[in-house]
Amino acid sequence: MRTTINLEKEELTHLLTTTHLKNKSKAVSIAIEEFLRRERLKKIDLLRGNFSFDEKILEARHYAR
């Protein structure tokens, strides 16, 4: 899909050097993918600690087989 965006020249140059790519589209695509990956990880991290298990259930898990 094509779209037009305005980027700061310094930021785009830094992105290209960081990704070691010459293709601007691929570098921007990688940056978007990384941003979305980090956002998914933040959501997963927010769930940490919200679950609790009864100790008996955890013990029974080992004896069920």
Image (cartoon, rainbow, N blue to C red):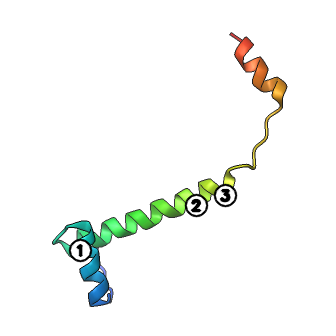
CA gap, disc 2 and disc 1: 26 Å
Which quadrant, please, contains the N terminus? bottom left
Provide the secondary structure element on which disc 1 rests.
helix
Measured from the top left, where is residue 36 in percent x and y? 46, 64
Provide the secondary structure element on which disc 2 rests.
helix
Comparing 26 with 3, the one in front is: 26
Q: Residues within 10 Å of mark 3 (few under 14, many from 20)?
A: few
- Amino acid type, residue under disc 2 in the picture: Lys
- Amino acid type, residue under disc 3 in the picture: Leu
Q: Name the residue carrying label 3.
A: 46
Q: Residue at x 83, y 32 (%)?
A: 54
Q: Residue at x 22, y 73 (%)?
A: 17
Q: Residue at x 79, y 35 (%)?
A: 53
Q: Name the residue carrying label 1.
A: 16
- Asked where in the image residue 23 lies, by quadrant, the reply is bottom left
N-terminal of the two: label 2 or label 1?
A: 1
Above or below 44: residue 5? below
Determine whether label 2 and label 1 are within 8 Å by CB. no
Above or below 60: residue 40? below
Q: Residues within 10 Å of mark 2 (few under 14, many from 20)?
A: few
- Asked where in the image residue 57 lies, by quadrant, the reply is top right
Determine whether label 2 and label 3 are within 8 Å by CB. yes
Residue that protrudes farthest toward the top in the picture: 65
- Amino acid type, residue under disc 1 in the picture: Leu
Task: Answer yes or no: is residue 16 visible.
Answer: yes
CA gap, disc 1 and disc 3: 32 Å
Q: Name the residue carrying label 2.
A: 42
